[in-house]
Amino acid sequence: MKTRNFLLDENKIDKKLIEEAAKLLKKGELVAFPTETVYGLGADGLNSQAVAKIFQAKSRPADNPLILHIASRKDLESLVEEIPPQAEILIEKYWPGPLTLILKKKDLVPNLVSAGLDTVAIRMPDNPIALALIEATARPLAAPSANRSGRPSPTQASHVMEDMKGRIPLILDGGPTGLGLESTVLDLSREEPLILRPGAITKEQLEGLLGGLGQEDYQDWQGQARSPGQKYRHYAPKAEMILFLGSFDKQKEAIKAQAILLAKEGKKVGIMATDEGKLSYQGLGLVRSMGSRQEKGKIGANLFKVLRAFDDDQVDIILAESVSKDHIGMAIMNRLLKAADGKTFGLEEE
Ligand code: TXA
Ligand code: MG
């Protein structure tokens, strides 16, 4: 299959190209599209055969459910049994935006989408191209991140091409995504609201609106997942990776010491640093910065791109700095720890 690429300007959307993409989706084909978080791999979310193609193209385990993307508030009613008051408050404040809500599903939602659960994940993406595509298709779009299963999520169209070339007919290229981390997933289907996946809408923000709320700690990434996706190794670079914990000074010292040891063993070392740390590692390995510790949003936006770049560099091992896990730091640490397959060095500071 040839994979085509349509270049789109989100400020001046070419409706003809959107119509062509929507036509493919209505026929049951897959189309990758940009959102404000990462690129999604879209299919008609009410067509089981189309949804099945997502699992195939990604090599995704069938027990990992998908998010339905909608373009207007009224699309929600046909998909879920009830909209609790907490959902109303959050929708009002954060949609369109990087917040996915888990609610009790209606029968209309195919079991393949929900992986057999009685709930469904729904969000309204904050990206004009995504919204135009959903509207033109007139269907909710089931869309996981458009990477091969286990690979870092795609934050630009070229990442999607790397992973999906020959597997899907079309990629809508809307440039790099702004946030770079997948949406916050919040379960509102049980008594206590629970964050299943941290994202750009933070625990602090959600608590400000809802009061107390649980969060699966970023270290529970392997845990008894209410979110099935959290149990798989994710965002994985090809190289082994170690995440360094502790004070910034301790991290730097430990990374330097390890880099020297590993280089002696003949390993090609990659160092995933921040702007503040990168000069400490000169001559000790291939250094790439995620951004400044003063602007953690940018670290989030760059994280997956840097992981993919280390793949291209063909390093044997990646030594990564960590950040504090408040606000967006929680989502960053969740992704870093998963990329490292849980491997850490040093102790977290209290
Ligand atoms: O930002 C995002 O959310 C991106 C863009 C494309 O919208 N999508 C995304 O989808 O990250 P995906 O499939 O890579 O991640 C969806 C996560 C998985 O961890 C999955 O297990 C969880 O949401 N999930 C989906 N439906 C669920 C459900 N009914 N109950 C619990 N967790 C669910
Ligand atoms: Mg994903």
Image: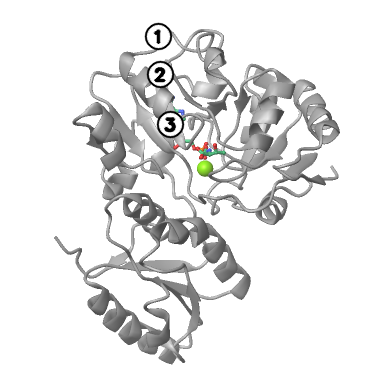
Question: Left or right of 8: which side holds 194?
Answer: left
Q: Which residue is mark 3?
A: 94
Q: How is the image coloured?
A: one colour
- Identify the secondary structure beneath mark 1: loop
**10 Å crowding of disc 1: few (<14), some (14-19), many (20+):** some
Of pointers 3 and 2, the one earlier in the residue sequence = 3
Comparing labels 3 and 2, the label whose residue is closer to the camera: 3
The percent position of residue 340, horizontal first and vertical second, equals 40, 61
Work out whether mark 3 precedes mark 1 in sequence or the reverse, and give the earlier one: 1
Label 3 sits on what residue type?
Answer: Tyr
**Residue 147 located left or right of residue 206:** right
Residue type, mark 1 in image: Glu
- Residue holding disc 2: 103
Q: CA distance from mark 3 to mark 1?
A: 19 Å
Residue 82 bears which disc, if any?
1
Give left or right: position of 152 versus 167. left
Residue 164 appears at what percent x and percent y?
71, 47
Q: CA distance from mark 3 to mark 2?
A: 16 Å
The residue nearer to you, when weighing 140 against 346, is: 140
Residue at the far front in the pictured view: 11
